[in-house]
Amino acid sequence: MKKLSVFCVALILSSILFVAFTFVKLGGIVGRVSHADAVSGISLIAGQDTMTVTVNQGSFSFTNLKEGVYTLVIKANAPYKDAIIENVAVKDSATTDLGEVVLKQ
């Protein structure tokens, strides 16, 4: 009887955890860079965490992001200057489109 009680409690707790994780919705950030050949890397910063992606024909995409506020850093090759976009908000299950980021010389 004791084993059955322990099993039932474990089953109930695992069910609760499974349901709790289904409510976590992830978002993303997408955009384009005006001079794709001038970009050496794109990073996304949240607190002390940093994520990087590669640029594909001028487009970039960050997926599976938790809701929050991020800073986007575009490292550029000379003669272009680096670009920093602060306070990029990501909402649950939504993708934030930054449109075209124009690099300045």
Image: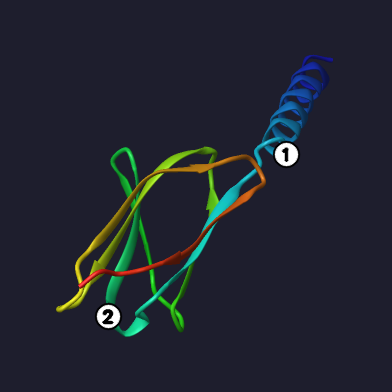
Q: Work out whether 5 lies above or below 70.
A: above
- Which quadrant of the structure image shows residue 11? top right
Callout 2 secondary element: helix
How packed mark 1 is, by other alpha carbons closer than 10 Å (few <14, some 14-19, many 20 or more), is: few
Q: Tell me if I can see residue 62 in this picture.
A: no
Please tell me which residue is depicted at 73% across the width and 25% down the height of the picture.
Answer: 10
x then y, percent, for residue 44 = 36, 54
Query: Counting residues from the N terminus, which is met first, the one under dot 2 or under dot 1?
Result: 1
The amino acid sitting under disc 2 is Ala
Please tell me which residue is depicted at 28% across the width and 41% down the height of the picture.
Answer: 48
The residue labelled by disc 2 is 38
Query: Which is nearer the eye, 11 or 103?
Result: 103
The residue labelled by disc 1 is 22
x then y, percent, for residue 50 = 32, 51
Q: Work out whether 8 lies above or below 50.
A: above
Query: Which is nearer the eye, 82 or 40?
Result: 82
Q: Tell me if I can see residue 88 in this picture.
A: yes
**Which image quarter is the N terminus in?**
top right
Callout 1 secondary element: helix
x then y, percent, for residue 58 = 44, 78
x then y, percent, for residue 79 = 15, 78
45 displayed left or right of 61: left
Please tell me which residue is depicted at 36% across the width and 68% down the height of the picture.
Answer: 102
C-alpha separation, residue under disc 2 versus residue under disc 1 = 40 Å
